[in-house]
Amino acid sequence: MARWGMVIDLLKCLGCYSCTVSCKEEHFLPPGVFWSRPLIGESGRFPKVRKHIYPVQCNQCREAACLKACPTGATSQRADGIVVIDYDQCVGCRYCLIACPYQQRTFLDRIREYYPGQGLTQYEKFGQGRFQVGTVVKCNFCVDRIEAGLENGLKPGLDREATPTCVNACPANARYFGDLDDPESEVSKLIVEKNAGQLHPEFGTDPSIYYIVR
Amino acid sequence: MEVKPYEWMVTFTPQKEWISGRGLLLWLAFFFIELGAGLYLVSIMMENPWGMAAGWLVTLGLGGGLHLLYLGRPFRFWRAVMRPQTSWISRGMIFLVLFSILGTLVLALSLHGFLRETPSTWGGLSLWWKLPAGFLAFVLIVYGGFAMNFVHALPLWNTALLPILFVAGGLWGGLESALGLQLLSGHSGPAEQIESWIRAFMLGYVWLIVVYLWSSRYGRPAGKKSAAEFLHGSLSLVFYTLVVFAGMIVPLSISLYSYKSGLGATPVSLLYLGILCGLAGDLAMRFCIL
């Protein structure tokens, strides 16, 4: 069974927000909810100033803290490593939000309109039924696209229809997606060749997203 | 390879889910459950059924009710008992349900006088009722600390001292509440004994807070930053006025006065002040921690 993972090349990332916008579009995310977002900042003093961009999202950790925290089993981990949430089971205790060391979960206290006072657009109406107020949401590696692609014999990471939308949207080709358990996959080779690392390995979560920093 | 976030990324982001907006309900829920369970436990030991009733009411009515109000989907609360093997929220809910059954039964029997009619207080049939109920009350005091201790990313939570601190706070609060009830009801009872226990637990609680904050200096940068927030950051006003002055200095002073002059000679209003300040300090400390 594959274990899906991602490699993000920070040397290529532009901070253009394409991943953020494409994710919002794909999943009909309400205002204020971001499953994929870049953290952007600066360091140094003029004239030696550097800009740093860290695209972050749920790391689909192999040893997910949120999984152990969830009292109802709403958060579960598939055989392919993707951590998913069953909104029908979530009680909204937000223990997973607290437990996640990467702060990549969002609690939906209400679903806002993109144009307040003007009602929902057709796009919003279509997507609103996907979420439940009072539950927690997060990135799921576009699991619907992966499953649909696999059913049609496509390969996630290689075929765009079966690959997460943030990977497809990146204009700089800074994102790679594939099977971490396959040593011949592009992601596995990149991790080894570029010495890619995980965020906060000291938490023991074994994230499935790796970053190339040099 | 460990990816070290650049310094701008390590502007620590405090958790807000359990302390802002609706999260304030959880702060109060943890406090009332621990206070009520502490009062229940102390009252079992003191053989005070009315204290047990008050503790039961605070634990289930206030604590349990606030827990439910906090949930995003309260009517699904029954699902939260599904995974005691992993989640402390699940275990806490199970303990609460068991307490609501056994604690209620023991309370009813105590109010009826059934458990007082047995030959000895802590022997015979009454022990088989009171011990499990007391154990459940103790577990309710401590489970919140373990639930927070599980969170690795927050150093001030992820320490073995936190459950111990909560136990000390819960028992101290329970003793204070028991003394307060004793004074209110005007009944003669082991007030001197309760007061001496209050002194012991108070000193223990103060010592634990000192050790708790001191030990954070030797931990991760996030822990040091959190402790710094207590001592000279955004939480310093609450910490020094409510936790230190109201929660420690005032009760300690009053306790010292009552020790020297005797509990009978101490004005009742002063004792009430000490009790209220102690409870306020405990509540404020939990606010700072969360």
Image: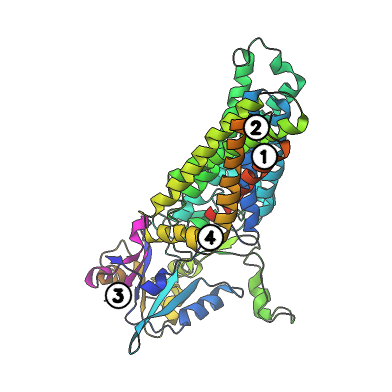
Q: Nearer the viewer, residue B182 or A193?
A: B182
Q: Which residue is mark 4?
A: B236
Q: CA distance from mark 3 to mark 4?
A: 39 Å
Q: CA distance from mark 2 to mark 3?
A: 56 Å
Q: Is residue B142 visible?
A: no
Q: State the mark number for residue B59.
A: 1
| Chain ID at mark 2 | B
Q: Residue at x 64, y 46 (%)?
A: B277
The answer to which quarter of the image holds residue A25 is bottom right
Q: Earlier in the sequence, mark 2 or mark 4?
A: 2
The type of residue carrying mark 2 is: Tyr
Q: CA distance from mark 2 to mark 4?
A: 33 Å
Say if A182 sits above or below B158 in the image: below
**Front tag of 4 and 1:** 4
The residues colored magenta run A191-214
**Front tag of 2 and 3:** 2
Q: Is residue B279 left or right of residue B212?
A: right
Q: CA distance from mark 4 to mark 1?
A: 30 Å
Q: Which residue is mark 2?
A: B40
Q: Residue at x 56, y 41 (%)?
A: B169
Q: Secondary structure at mark 2?
A: helix
Q: Earlier in the sequence, mark 4 or mark 1?
A: 1
Label 3 with label 4: CB-CB less than 8 Å: no
Q: Is residue A11 visible?
A: yes
Q: Secondary structure at mark 1?
A: helix
| Chain ID at mark 3 | A
Same chain under badges 3 and 4? The reply is: no
Q: Which residue is mark 3?
A: A213
Q: State the mark number for residue B274.
A: none
Q: Nearer the viewer, residue B272 or B75?
A: B272
